[in-house]
Amino acid sequence: MNRLLLTIMAVLAFTASWADDKTDVTAKYVVNASFEGDDISTLTPVNNSADGLRGYAVSNPTDWTVSGYKDVSLIVTSNCYTDNNFGLVDKLADGNQAYYLRMAWSTNTTTISQTISSLPKGKYQLKVSVRSAYTNGATSSFDIKAAGRSSSTTFTQGSTNCFPSMKWDVVSIDFEQKVNGSATIGFDITWASGGSCIMFDDVRLYQHSDDYVIQPDPADISPTEGVITSDFVTEESMKHDLLQMLANFAVYMKNDFQSSSNNSAGEQTGVFKGESTGNSNEAGVRTNADLSMICAFLVKYGKRVVTLPSEVTWDDLEAMAKKSLVFAYSTHKANNLKKCNDGNNWGSVSNADHVWESSLWAMSVAYSAFFQWDKLSDTQKNYIYKLLKAECNYELERSIPTGYAGDTKAEENGWEADVLAATLGLFPKDDLAPKWFARLR
Ligand SMILES: [Ca+2]
């Protein structure tokens, strides 16, 4: 038993180490990886009166492409001095030379890249040794990048003579080469103004084993996926918050409401204002019907649960819900107890006499009625019935809306089905109910 356990542990240990194994393929694919490729004896030395040799000017190191800002672009050796009194380069990460860039009082960007012409499909890691320093708050940053992936690092706060005692940081990024072909590697620098510099050395490319798992970029990790779950906010708490938001909105509903003349049955009416207040078109009917529905919903589900703004009472809401509903059913063609403000009635009663989208507005009327159903008289319920039956007559007669290019009519299908569903819900035993249901389906 113990022997078996040991064997399993050995296999697991071997598998784990094998999974982390990676092969250094730098020499095979990266050219001038340690910035040793330029012969400094052929380059122009750059000297500074303050301290002496700063480095050897290059437009770009051999086999690398440098674009953007590169006014101070140098091959440096251990005996070169750096800017801002940051001291000697001193130790190098590898070999005798490194690549150095510096920005003073300006902002800009620099890109250093090399394209590997033929990198086999696989998983890789790009590494670079880097030292940076900034002063005067010039928090420049650089990205290491490979095959479309990148990772950002902020420069280090510099100080007088800091480089001789500063370690070389090793920065890396894992990436996947998805198909055989070219891959671009390199670094992007974003310069802040005030004085900052960076030196690169010892670029290395490793190939991971095929079963290596590359961690996703932090930028690719969704801030909501797996976070906004049913555990994040309970359903009860969310529903309460939403209801309270509607309650807070009540002050705007009250400000948006105006009285209107009684209908011919002597009932008080009122209407929610809009861009076409009280008229028979969408901007008149829909606004009123929707806010009537919201008002009635709030009264039915919010009372004794949420708090209204100080300017609004539950009686206000109840009165507005009722009067706006009376306005809606009174002005519909099926009832004609009152004209809309433009002198017309609204809605559809048949295929021959229909208005596009009126079923959507009628659905809101149906919901408003449903939320205050127990407070409606039988006569009022009959007005609702006549309105919805007329709208459904049109549904039974019309062709089902379909479309292809540019307008699928999916939305229109949605609201045409809604009014049938709402009417079926309120009058399930009606003689026409089977037809409404069949049409709905
Ligand atoms: Ca080197």
Image (spheres, helix red, strand yellow):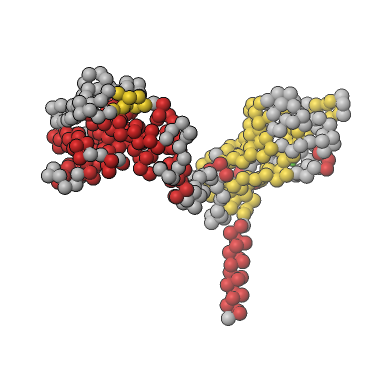
Report the residue at 68% width, 29% height from top: 191
Q: Nearer the viewer, residue 371 or 417?
A: 371
Image quadrant holding the N terminus, namely: bottom right
Asked if residue 105 is positioned above or below residue 223 in the image, the reply reads: above
Image quadrant holding the C terminus, namely: top left
Residue 366 visible from this viewpoint: yes
Q: Position of residue 136 (x, y in %)?
A: 77, 29
Q: Nearer the viewer, residue 263 or 280?
A: 263
Task: Please identify the quarter of the rendering in which residue 296 is found.
Answer: top left
Asked if residue 190 is positioned above or below residue 173 in the image, the reply reads: above
Asked if residue 317 is positioned above or below residue 434 in the image, the reply reads: above
Q: Position of residue 393 (x, y in %)?
A: 15, 35
Q: Position of residue 111 (x, y in %)?
A: 63, 31
Q: Nearer the viewer, residue 436 or 293?
A: 293
Ligand 1's image quarter is: top right
Report the residue at 43% width, 33% height from top: 312
